[in-house]
Image (cartoon, coloured by chain):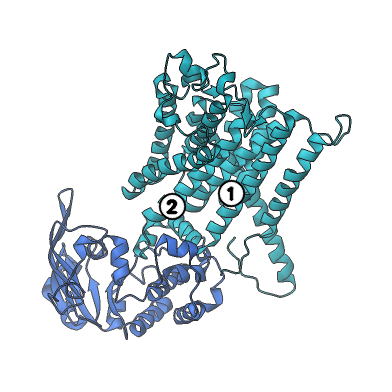
Chain colours: A cyan, B blue
């Protein structure tokens, strides 16, 4: 029953690919001469680094949706909050190099005629504090949100709707200039991170590697959680919530814990995303972003973790291609993809492949005369 | 236990009233169960059997009346999880097992063990847990299917698995809602035998429609009608009661 290992074959392949990418891609970008076919150009690093952040968001979402049945349509909000926390640190690093050369205030505050740094910005010149906020802000919001929602037993589509409302409310709030987060334009014009130039190729390569490692750590945490007895209770809640309650489990506490953990992972993904794309603005809170993340997970296979990451990378690769080649058709393609996956691949790519392999293995062993019962996962 | 025992009964309901949107599901239901007793509850559709289970397990709060467990614990003040922790287990009418878990994981989740999130996240399996699971699977006759997903079991097997999960909780009181609904005759007979053996060291309340099954159990019977008790006693006495005959055969 607990014989399954932390790294099964699927997870081991995933880990090897991520570690190899974290090591080889920077080498290929920095040490290999541009003329070589093995050279990785800078724009590829930036693009794939972004995909890895999306993949981490997808793993976080799969943890709550795939295993606990909480269909959050607001995970983009936690991603964006983590991104804002990192963006505020990066803004403070600009110092006097801004257009208005004010050593204390970011440009937009000078433009708004502010004289003091708002309290919310205090401490963000420290990288450690910013990292803490990357985890704490999404975590506290998820905890407060979940506290009320799960205790009131809001479930299913109603919960999805209020998560969507949450991210929309944040979108509107962050649009306002007097919120003090740069309004419509958000935060941008970043110069350096920990003294390294954000635009420089070595920094970009390092951010790529960090994203790969963060994705691997996020995966391992999610995997450890889902393999524990706690994870079995999550699946029990997903399958039969009130039955779980009658067994004596406090369903709201389980949901609250996993939702908060997932939000913190999403925050880390956002924090790695912002220095790589060079901007964070309120459009990251757009409800459509959160819905897209759900589609990544569905395409890759919910409840598989690895599938969620693969789905995020594949769909975003498609998005990059489509928005370049046929920009007006991307949303139709995304919609069609979701419909097709729901109809023909309800378990997603990885879930369906896993099923096929399991069937073949069973057939192979069955031929030798052994009775092999269906095994979960 | 807190306070002085108010009653010597294991379960004590007095004057319980519940209404939903003006419909009175329970109109002053009173019932007392002595420790170690197995009781069958029968009654036509809409008699209030399931509502009674809901009140005892904390799913529904009564508008009026008292519900006490083990003498002095007021169940109306507790929620489902707290009541389950006290030692009241419930089997639903429609078998609800965790379909994407294996048979043995279903039992594992039900086993008496710390239920707090921190305990399940960081705790290790206690020693002897496999032996307990083995024993329960043997009792309900599902040892061979332990590694199968519960979703793939037949209807009867799901019912037994659910009874096994109840046993794993090791409750002081088992509430069993229509355990033989949809079962074949052979399965029904096996289930009656299973419940009788469980009743040796547990108190059980069985709600059932199937009169042959209730007769087979051979225990005291309570008849509900329109949210109140209309008769109580051995099955032969109860089934000869003119009020019961009228309720069951129509007027």
Q: Is residue B103 above or below residue A275?
A: below
Are the residues flagged by discs 1 and 2 from a single subunit?
yes
- State which quarter of the image contains the N terminus of chain A: bottom right
Separation of residues labelled 1 and 2 (CA atoms) = 16 Å
- Residue at 69%, 32% (x, y): give it: A47
Disc 2 residue crowd, few under 14, some 14–19, many 20+, Cα 10 Å = some
Label 1 marks a residue whose chain is: A
Q: Secondary structure at mark 1?
A: helix
Q: Secondary structure at mark 2?
A: helix
Q: Which residue is mark 2?
A: A257
Q: Which residue is mark 1?
A: A218
Out of B48 and A30, give the one closest to the viewer. Answer: A30
Where is residue A207, by image quadrant?
A: top right
Indicate the position of residue B225 as horizontal and vertical percent values: 16, 65
| Lower sequence index among marks 1 and 2 | 1
For residue A143, side relative to residue A344 (left or right): left
Indicate the position of residue B199 as horizontal and vertical percent values: 31, 83
- Do we see residue B98 in this rendering? no
Out of B7 and A193, give the one closest to the viewer. Answer: A193
Label 2 marks a residue whose chain is: A
Where is residue A159, by image quadrant?
A: top left
- Residue at 44%, 71% (x, y): give it: B161
For residue B83, side relative to residue A168 (left or right): left
- Residue at 70%, 47% (x, y): give it: A18
- State which quarter of the image contains the C terminus of chain A: bottom right
For residue B85, side relative to residue B61 (left or right): right
Q: Is residue A217 above or below residue B100?
A: above
- Do we see residue A313 in this rendering? yes
Indicate the position of residue A235 as horizontal and vertical percent values: 48, 57
- Residue at 32%, 68% (x, y): give it: B85
User: Which labelled disc corresponds to residue B215?
Assistant: none
């Amino acid at each position: 029953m607990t014989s399954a290992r932390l790294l099964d074959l699927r997870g081991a392949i995933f880990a090897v690919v991520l570690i190899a990418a974290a090591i080889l891609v920077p080498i290929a970008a920095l040490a290999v001469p541009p003329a070589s076919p093995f050279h990785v150009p800078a724009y590829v690093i930036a693009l794939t680094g972004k995909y890895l952040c999306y993949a981490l968001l997808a793993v976080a979402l799969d943890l709550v949706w795939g295993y606990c049945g909480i269909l959050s349509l607001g995970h983009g909000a936690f991603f964006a909050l983590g991104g804002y926390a990192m963006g505020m640190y990066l803004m403070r690093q600009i110092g006097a190099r801004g257009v208005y050369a004010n050593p204390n205030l970011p440009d937009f505050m000078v433009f708004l005629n502010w004289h003091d740094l708002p309290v919310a910005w205090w401490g963000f010149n420290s990288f450690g504090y910013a990292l803490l906020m990357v985890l704490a802000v999404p975590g506290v919001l998820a905890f407060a949100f979940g506290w009320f929602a799960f205790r009131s037993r809001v479930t299913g589509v109603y919960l999805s709707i209020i998560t969507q409302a949450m991210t929309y409310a944040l979108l509107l709030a962050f649009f306002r200039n007097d919120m003090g987060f740069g309004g419509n334009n958000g935060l941008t014009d970043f110069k350096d991170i920990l003294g390294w130039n954000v635009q420089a190729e070595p920094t970009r390569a390092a951010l790529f590697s960090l994203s790969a490692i963060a994705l691997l750590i996020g995966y391992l945490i999610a995997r450890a959680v889902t393999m524990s007895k706690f994870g079995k209770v999550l699946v029990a809640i997903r399958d039969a919530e009130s039955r779980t309650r009658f067994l004596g489990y406090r369903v709201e506490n389980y949901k609250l814990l996993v939702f908060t953990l997932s939000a913190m992972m999403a925050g880390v993904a956002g924090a790695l995303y912002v220095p790589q794309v060079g901007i964070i603005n309120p459009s990251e809170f757009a409800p459509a972003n959160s819905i897209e993340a759900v589609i990544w997970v569905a395409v890759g296979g919910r409840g598989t973790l690895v599938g969620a990451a693969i789905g995020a990378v594949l769909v975003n690769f498609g998005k990059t291609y489509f928005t370049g080649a046929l920009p007006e058709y991307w949303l139709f393609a995304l919609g069609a993809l979701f419909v097709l996956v729901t109809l023909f691949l309800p378990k997603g790519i990885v879930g369906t492949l896993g099923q096929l392999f399991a069937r073949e293995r069973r057939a192979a062993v069955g031929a030798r005369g052994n009775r092999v019962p269906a095994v979960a996962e | 236990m807190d306070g002085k025992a108010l009653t010597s009964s294991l379960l004590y309901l007095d004057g319980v009233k519940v209404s939903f949107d003006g419909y009175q599901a329970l109109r002053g239901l009173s019932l007392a169960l002595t420790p170690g007793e197995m009781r069958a509850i029968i009654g036509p559709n809409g008699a209030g059997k399931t509502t009674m289970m809901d009140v005892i397990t904390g799913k529904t709060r009564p508008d009026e009346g008292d519900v006490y467990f083990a003498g002095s614990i007021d169940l109306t003040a507790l929620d489902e999880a707290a009541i389950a922790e006290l030692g009241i287990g419930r089997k639903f009418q429609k078998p609800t097992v965790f379909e994407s878990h294996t048979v043995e994981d279903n039992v594992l989740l039900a086993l008496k063990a710390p239920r707090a999130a921190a305990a399940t996240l960081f705790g290790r399996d206690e020693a002897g847990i496999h032996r307990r699971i083995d024993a329960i699977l043997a009792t309900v006759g599902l040892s061979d299917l332990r590694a199968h997903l519960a979703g793939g079991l037949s209807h009867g097997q799901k019912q037994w698995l659910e009874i096994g999960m109840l046993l794993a909780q090791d409750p002081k009181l088992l509430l069993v809602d229509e355990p033989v609904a949809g079962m074949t005759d052979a399965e029904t007979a096996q289930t009656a035998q299973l419940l009788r053996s469980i009743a040796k060291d547990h108190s059980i309340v069985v709600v059932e429609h199937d009169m042959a099954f209730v007769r087979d159990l051979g225990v005291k019977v309570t008849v509900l009608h329109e949210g109140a008790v209309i008769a109580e006693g051995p099955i032969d006495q109860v089934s000869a009661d003119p009020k019961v005959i009228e309720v069951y055969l129509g007027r």
